Amino acid sequence: MPIPSSRTQNTNNLSLETLPDRVKPIAATYVRTSTTVTVTSTAHGLPTGREIKVLSAADAGLVSGNFPINWPTITSTGADTFTFTTASTGTATAGSSISYIGKNLDSDQIDSDPSLPA
């Protein structure tokens, strides 16, 4: 039986989009103040202007698909932090969980498990 070349990522009971099998979502934490989300993701390596897709978040309004911008553009604010803006306002305490992928996948987001298809 052939192994499928893609899978659907399901979070918060939403089927978001088909992702390549070898994509590893990155787990991080965030805090939100008003419309600004600050993500803490150790050594994220994302440059300002990179787009991300939020796969899951403590605040369902941040999940791409619920969020008006499917791939929000980030501003890198440090080696371990970046920000993006949401359309909705609110607050989330520091340490809230989030997972994401970058639009242009980096090598650290590709699973190196040789048992998975390329």
Image (tube, helix red, strand yellow):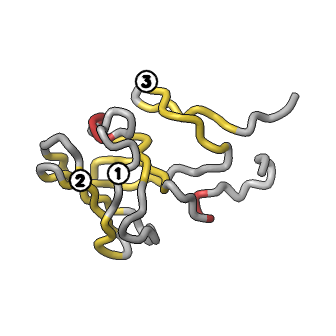
Q: Residue furthest bottom?
A: 79
Residue 78 percent across, percent down from the top left: 32, 75
Name the residue located 42 percent from the left edge and 56 percent from the top edge.
51
State the residue position of label 2.
Answer: 85
Residue 62 percent across, percent down from the top left: 30, 41
State the residue position of label 1.
Answer: 72
Task: Tell me the kind of residue under disc 2.
Answer: Thr
Q: Residues within 10 Å of mark 3 (few under 14, many from 20)?
A: few
Is residue 6 placed above or below 25 in the rendered structure?
Answer: above
Q: Are marks 1 and 2 in contact (CB under 8 Å)?
A: yes
- Name the element at disc 3: loop
Of pointers 3 and 2, the one earlier in the residue sequence: 3
Image quarter of the N terminus: top right
Q: Residues within 10 Å of mark 1 (few under 14, many from 20)?
A: many
Residue 92 percent across, percent down from the top left: 18, 46
Name the residue located 77 percent from the left edge and 51 percent from the top edge.
118
Name the residue located 54 percent from the left edge and 59 percent from the top edge.
104
Task: Tell me the kind of residue under disc 3.
Answer: Asn
Q: Residue furthest right?
A: 1
The disc label shown at residue 88, or none = none
Is residue 36 or residue 59 the one in the foreground? 36
State the residue position of label 3.
Answer: 13
Task: Tell me the kind of residue under disc 1.
Answer: Pro
Of pointers 3 and 1, the one earlier in the residue sequence: 3
In this rendering, the label closer to the viewer, 3 or 2 = 2
- In-image side of 48 versus 7 (left or right): left
